[in-house]
Amino acid sequence: MSALAHLPQLDVDPFDAEVLRAPGSYHESLRTLGCAVALPRYGVVASGRIAGVEQVFRDWRTFTSARGVGLADFAAEPPWRPPSIVLEVDPPAHERTRRVLARALAPAAVARLRATMARTAVDYVERALAAGTVDGARELAQAFPLEVFGDAVGLDDGPRENLLRYGAMVFNALGPDNAMRRRALAAADEVVPWIAAKCTRPALREGGFGAAIHAAAADGDISADEAALLVRSLLSAGIDTTVATLAFALDAFARHPAQWSRLRAEPALIPAAIDEVLRWASPVHTFCRTSTRDCVIGDAPVPAGTKVLCVIAAANRDPARWEDADRFDIARPRRPHAAFGSGIHVCVGQHVARQEVTVLLEALVARVARIEPAGAAVLEPGNSVNGIAALPLALYAD
Ligand code: OVM
């Protein structure tokens, strides 16, 4: 008998591309069955309630990140790359590296980039309006972060598409050995050395986030190798997530024109709208922890050594916290969501991400009366991050 036999069982493959495309009934089953549900396909536990996800994220002693935050247990199989020294690690080691990133990505450091990012956002919107129709996925959601985040890190002016390929590797590697994971990792031989080269001090411009991280090595807070690995964390976590968020924002407003009108009438709602996009779309849909001891999630007993899937996308539509949770409503009461995680690993780059989305929405609000679908959106399911591969849109100026 399985160690998880006492729990409610749900026989779905949460990493199946079709489940990821239409996750509603999977998510509802998770939330309804209990705070912790066994997924017999993988011998793991999943929580799809906001209370369960928050409990797990906030208790790093019971739910370690050091055995990986994907389905694979680093205690049982070697990771595909040297582990992240900030994500895949617990205190005390986590605190030293987190501090370096938190300083480099602090709100004040991010705010200094705002005017430049905002000017670039206006250029993107003017170009899109001049064209009339755009692929919102490629021409806005991908191109804009590649330019402004790449510049913020201090990358050179060469092609940056490998950042997207690397992000796909990092996030799809968090799932099972399925087609999405294999396809993404097939690019490793080409992309991993490229990324490693971009993480070294000489490859990074003065004044960027990368240089700030390497300055911490010069100060003796971390080693030069650690600095390069922390730059790798920026390049791992900083692109696909924001790209997906921008695409989901554009898609959400194209499909909810009254919400766009509302935002235009009241641009002060932009911060709330960003959180609603994050809640409603949950670009990062699943992250894992591993239990270090026998414990309970809610009232469900979970044995030591269990992989726990925190199903953020299910938790972010939990009716226990949000009324009519499936509705996209930028003016709903603001309540804490889990799209950036919570606890000690809560997204350290969120000020950058929020600023990228803010300046693009501001530029759109200022000029674009209507955003309309101009064809079918192509969803791109992923093992940890969902995205949009193609998003035909028609933009109309005032
Ligand atoms: C990293 C990292 C950080 C956050 C998310 C992420 C899996 C990676 O440190 O490499 O995606």
Image (cartoon, grey):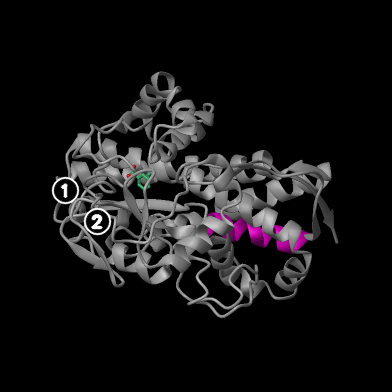
Q: Nearer the viewer, residue 225 or 65?
A: 65
* Ligand 1 contact, mark 2 (Cβ < 8 Å): no
Residue at point 65% right, 72% down? 329
Secondary structure mainly formed by the magenta segment: helix
Q: Nearer the viewer, residue 284 or 306?
A: 306
**Residue 135, position as x, y percentages in the image:** 73, 41
Residue located beneath label 2 in the image: 99
Q: Secondary structure at mark 1?
A: loop
In the current view of this chain or complex, which residue is farthest to the top?
189
Q: In this image, 56 relative to 95: left or right?
A: right
Residue at point 80% right, 44% down? 375
Residue 107: image tag: none
**Residue 145, position as x, y percentages in the image:** 55, 44
Q: Is residue 112 above or below residue 76?
A: below
Query: Magenta includes 363?
Result: yes
Q: In this image, 251 relative to 258: left or right?
A: left
Q: Amino acid at mark 1?
A: Asp
Where's ligand 1: which quadrant?
top left
Q: Earlier in the sequence, mark 1 or mark 2?
A: 2
Residue at point 54% right, 46% down? 386
Q: CA distance from mark 1 to mark 2?
A: 10 Å
Mark 1 vs mark 2: in front:
2
Q: Amino acid at mark 2?
A: Arg
State yes or no: discs 1 and 2 in contact (Cβ < 8 Å). yes
Q: In this image, 385 relative to 362: left or right?
A: left
**Residue 321, position as x, y percentages in the image:** 49, 77
Q: Nearer the viewer, residue 92 or 173?
A: 173
Q: Which residues are magenta?
A: 355-367
Residue 166 in which image quadrant: top left
**Residue 395, position as x, y percentages in the image:** 81, 52
Q: Residues within 10 Å of mark 1 (few under 14, many from 20)?
A: some
Quadrant that contains the C terminus: bottom right
